[in-house]
Image (spheres, rainbow, N blue to C red):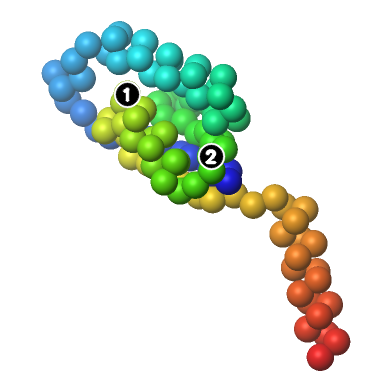
Amino acid sequence: MKYFVHFTPKPVVSAQRGDDLSGDKAAIAYIAELQKKGVLEVGYAFVTGGGIGILNVASHEELWEVLYNYPGYTAFQWQVEPLADVAQIFSRAIAIQEQETKK
């Protein structure tokens, strides 16, 4: 199952941020591991903060676990959209429409 994930940083006071370097290093290692496993198919960061990713996991629960285990999970707001193969969707829509016109 593939998901489009959009993450936006929550507003924070600079004193709350703590040691960004260790958090960034942990995030880089986590992202690299997801890419190696094929879970993170593509990921992009926005210049202004946050970013997007396409994740491939077996279930909604696995997606939750992947996101929740991200080292900076609580620092972001998360939006998730399930994805479907566009060719399969169009093929199915055409088949349904053709079936309806035969009635």
Q: Which quarter of the figure has residue 76? A: top left
Q: Secondary structure at mark 1?
A: loop
Q: Quadrant of the C terminus?
A: bottom right
Q: Which quarter of the figure has residue 30? A: top left
20 with respect to 83 (left or right): left
Q: Secondary structure at mark 2?
A: loop
Q: Nearer the viewer, mark 1 or mark 2?
A: 2
Specify whether residue 79 is in view: no
Q: Residue furthest left?
A: 15
Q: Mark 2 = which residue?
A: 57
Q: Which quarter of the figure has residue 22? A: top left
* Residue located at (32% from left, 24% from top): 71
Q: Mark 1 = which residue?
A: 71
Report the amino acid beneath label 1. Pro
Q: How many marks?
A: 2
80 with respect to 22 (left or right): right
* Residue located at (70% from left, 50% from top): 85
Label 2: how many Cα within 10 Å (few below 14, some 14–19, many 20+): some
Q: Position of residue 15 (x, y in %)?
A: 14, 18
36 with respect to 6 (left or right): right
Report the amino acid beneath label 2. Val
Specify whether residue 18 is in view: yes
Which of 34 and 10 lies nearest the eye of the viewer?
A: 34
34 with respect to 74 (left or right): right
Q: Position of residue 32 (x, y in %)?
A: 50, 17
* Residue located at (30% from left, 8% from top): 21
